[in-house]
Image: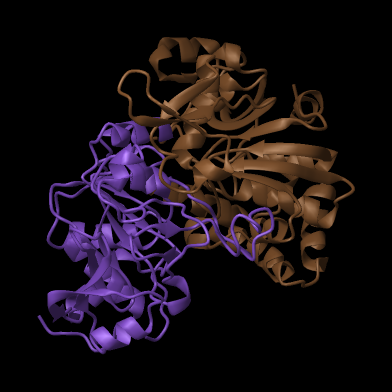
Amino acid sequence: MTVSTDYTAQEIIVVAGAKILEDKKIVFVGTGLPMVASLLAILTHAPGLIPVFEAGAVAPPLKHGLPISVGDSKTFTGASYLKGLNAAFELTQRGYADYGFIGGAEVDMYGNLNSTMMGAFPADYAKPKVRLPGSGGASDIAASCERTILIVPHDKKKFNERLSYITSPGHLDGSPDARRKAGMQGKGPHRLITTKGVFDFDEKTKRMRILQTFPGETVESIQANTGFELLVAPNVSQFQAPTVEEVRLIREVVDPDGAFVKRVAK
Amino acid sequence: MTLKEAVARFVKPGSNVGIGGFVNTRQPIAICHEMIRQGFKDLTLSWQSAGLAPELLAGAMMVRPDHCSIKRIELAYWGHESFGLSPAWRYVAERGLIEVEDWSNYNMSARFKAGAMGLPFLPTRSPLGGDIKNTSRTKIIDCPFTGRPIGLVPASHPNVGLIHVQAADMYGNCVIRGGESTCAEIAMASDFTIVTCEQLVSHELIARNPEDTTIPFPAVDAVVHVPFGGYPGACRRSYYFNGDAIREYLGLITPMVKGGSADGLKAWFDKNIFGVETFEDYIEKFSIKKLLADQLVEFHNDERLA
């Protein structure tokens, strides 16, 4: 297992995401890097992973390669159950999804995500500074899956105490039982993967906590790039760099066309 | 009925138009081309996740606001996944050109489902917690049975639904292959529905396997045979995404977000929509080689004997 010295920030996110996924669990997979990480997990330690895609596919084996959309034909082939959006989300609302795996552009210390707009809210809602695509299924996944795994590129301007807009609810304000009181189900954010490390959420305060630092990063360097105070787990470890084989799999097998994993230098 | 007749008859100024498909899969591209050719005014557009269909309609508004205008959008997602963000979405939203109501995919799907069921709303957990409930018409009540908070989302009843399917008969019985998206709900919820199909088949063939019918005939008001009607998006069993064409079109809009020239986009509309009579004329501009290649990829995605 030779460790790679040539990998990109997106590639280490994909490897970390894949490692968090457990075999034989039902994972509601959002678009983008979560799809890449799920396929890598299937090809490595989790061949029995059961993906659900919101356009309707439940449990496809993904034998035809990486879908470039959650409504891609490649998600339909070999699926066990294939209806439409309502069926996929009803199954999730009923509580059948063990994990939801989603991305966002902005995150706060309680794992709430924004993928709607940047700018003052509510003042600029009708004319935002930057308009993002919108929730898609992310807020549905966040409100109903048993646990969620989040991906957000690490950037001080995107790790904020207050979000421009809460698209996908996490632990809300961190108060006891906040999710249940709001009417949601599931335990909320379980892990966050960024370009700098892996985080969990403190059991009691629900605040974001550094669990693992990526190579080249320290607790201090990560805190310096975060717009709020992070908690630090008792035994922070260094996340091992991707292996040469993992990088090869991503580049040659999982995403050979660079649909989601762009070939930019780290 | 021709596509020209169907659009002229059912899409009116101020209509609420429901858009079928999902992102760039089975989007009603041919119908959107015809709408742009004829022009439209003050439309409301409703969908869950869409890509090229609104990108075309909004692109037309960006180059010919006198001819094409959108007033309001009710949506969950507008973008192109691996092909990137939607530049037209950024253009119209960041300039405050349209009213917006953000929902989630399940909120919009439940709204169409309520409409399809003939009910005024559906209860769902999914708008709770975040800001969607604050920027939409969601009502939160204490459930009369459990006492827990629950969200109510209002039915969506588009005036006209636009749906592209793999096969249909002349009465409007539709067969959808692959994910059904929210197409049946949109068709059922809409006052009128225009369907385009890759394959127009006899009613006898449909009636041999009625369990395959996803959209029943009473929900459909016009059926038009339009092969490649979802292209350059994808259509299960027929063709995969033409990523080059999608990227090329988006590339013409992207510079306009930051104030760049509209010339390239104008030229695209003149060449591909305003300068031709039918969608077939647009498809004719692609090389046979490329069309066959996109069909071939899809035949691998869903292998079957001829």
Q: Count how many numbered circles sit on residues in the image.
A: 0
Name the side, left or right, on which B282 lies relative to B149: right
What colour is chain B? Answer: brown
Percent x, y of residue A20:
18, 62
Decide if residue B236 is in sight here. Answer: no
Residue lying at the far front in this picture: please name it.
A175
Residue that appears at 82% across and 67% down:
B263
Residue at image position (27%, 31%) is: A94
Question: Which image quadrant is residue A39 in?
Answer: bottom left
Residue depicted at x 34% and y 79%:
A9
Q: Nearer the viewer, residue A210 or A252?
A: A210
**Does A88 sit left or right of B80 as displayed?**
left
Residue at 30% from the left image edge and 23% from the top image edge: B146
Front-lying residue, B281 or A53: A53
In-image side of B267 versus A244 (left or right): right
- Residue A76 vertical position relative to residue A254 in the rendered view, above or below: above
Question: Quadrant location of the N terminus of chain B?
Answer: top right
Rendered colour, chain A: purple
Coordinates of residue A162 in the picture (x, y in percent): 46, 64
Viewer-proximal residue among A178 and A89: A178
The coloring applied to the image is by chain
> Outermost residue, right direction?
B66
Image quadrant in which you'd find residue B266: bottom right
Is A99 located above or below residue A215 in the figure?
A: above
- The front one of B72 and B188 is B72
Quarter of the rendering containing residue B63: bottom right
User: Is any atom of residue A161 visible in this view?
Assistant: yes
Q: x%, y% of residue A196?
A: 30, 79
Instruction: Quarter of the image for the C terminus of chain B: give it.
Output: top left
Q: Is residue B120 above or below residue A153?
A: above
